[in-house]
Amino acid sequence: MNLNSLSDLYRHMQWADAGVWQAVFAAESALADQKITEYFYHLHLVQHAFLRAWRDEPRDTPFPKFDDVRSLRSWGQAYYREIFEHLEKLTDEGISKPAVLPWTELVEKQLGQAPAAITLSDMMLQVPLHSQYHRGQINARLRAVGGEPPLVDYIAWLWLGRPEANWDFKSE
């Protein structure tokens, strides 16, 4: 994995996140659905948590909580400015080096063994893959509450010419 490929995955992730948010805002029933809100919170929390780890920020700083979906959406959108600034500081050589997450002890408990060594690029690949999984959950729930899930597959993004994310949709 190199920085060009990772940057593409993160650009797709942003486009897909914005597209799913747009579909949720288009369906009033989805906006009020607690499960969709929980999925989005978890998706964005993990994105922010990994970025904090990569920037060596304190682990004990609490993540924000949100009273409304508009604030949660804004937090999710703000992540992308931060991650792209971070990506610009990295090199292919740097991301190929071994990396350890600050929450490795939790992983060890869950796996029942110490996790194998990974590189920073391996870790960075996890975030778009994890986000894709949860966007799928959100889309399934969106359909269940009467909304229309958007087509956000990576191949669709490529076929569309790698469009920029559109966060400029009605959120009021």
Image: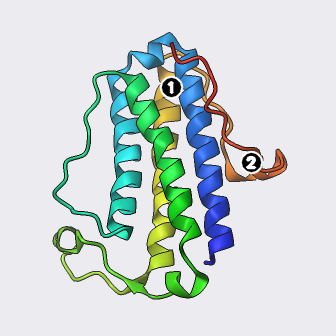
Badge 1 crowding class, 10 Å Cα cut-off, few under 14, some 14 to 19, many 20 or more, is many
Q: Quadrant of the N terminus?
A: bottom right
Mark 2 in CB contact with mark 1 (< 8 angstroms):
no
Count of labels in the image = 2
Residue 118, quarter of the rendered image: bottom left
Q: Is residue 35 or residue 102 the one in the foreground? A: 102
Q: Is residue 149 or residue 89 the one in the foreground? A: 89
Q: Looking at numbered disc 2 in the image, what kind of residue is underneath it?
A: Trp
- Rendered image: mark on residue 157: 2
Residue 38: image location, x then y, percent: 33, 34
Q: Is residue 132 visible?
A: no
Q: Looking at numbered disc 1 in the image, what kind of residue is underneath it?
A: Leu
Residue 18: image location, x then y, percent: 59, 36
Real-space Cα distance between discs 2 and 1?
Answer: 20 Å
Coloured how? rainbow
Residue 2: image location, x then y, percent: 63, 77
Considering the numbered disc 1 on the image, is that residue within a helix, a strand or a loop? helix
Residue at 41% of width from left, 53% of height from top?
47
Where 17 falls versus 93 (above or below)?
above
Q: Is residue 119 or residue 90 the one in the foreground? A: 90
Q: Is residue 144 or residue 85 the one in the foreground? A: 85
Please state if 151 lies on the left or on the right of 139 as rendered: right
Where 92 falls versus 155 (above or below)?
below
Residue at 39% of width from left, 31% of height from top?
72
Residue at 62% of width from left, 22% of height from top?
169
Residue at 40% of width from left, 61% of height from top?
51
Answer with mark 2 or mark 1, whichever residue precedes in sequence. 1
Q: Which residue lies under the disc numbered 1?
A: 142
Please state if 23 lies on the left or on the right of 58 as rendered: right
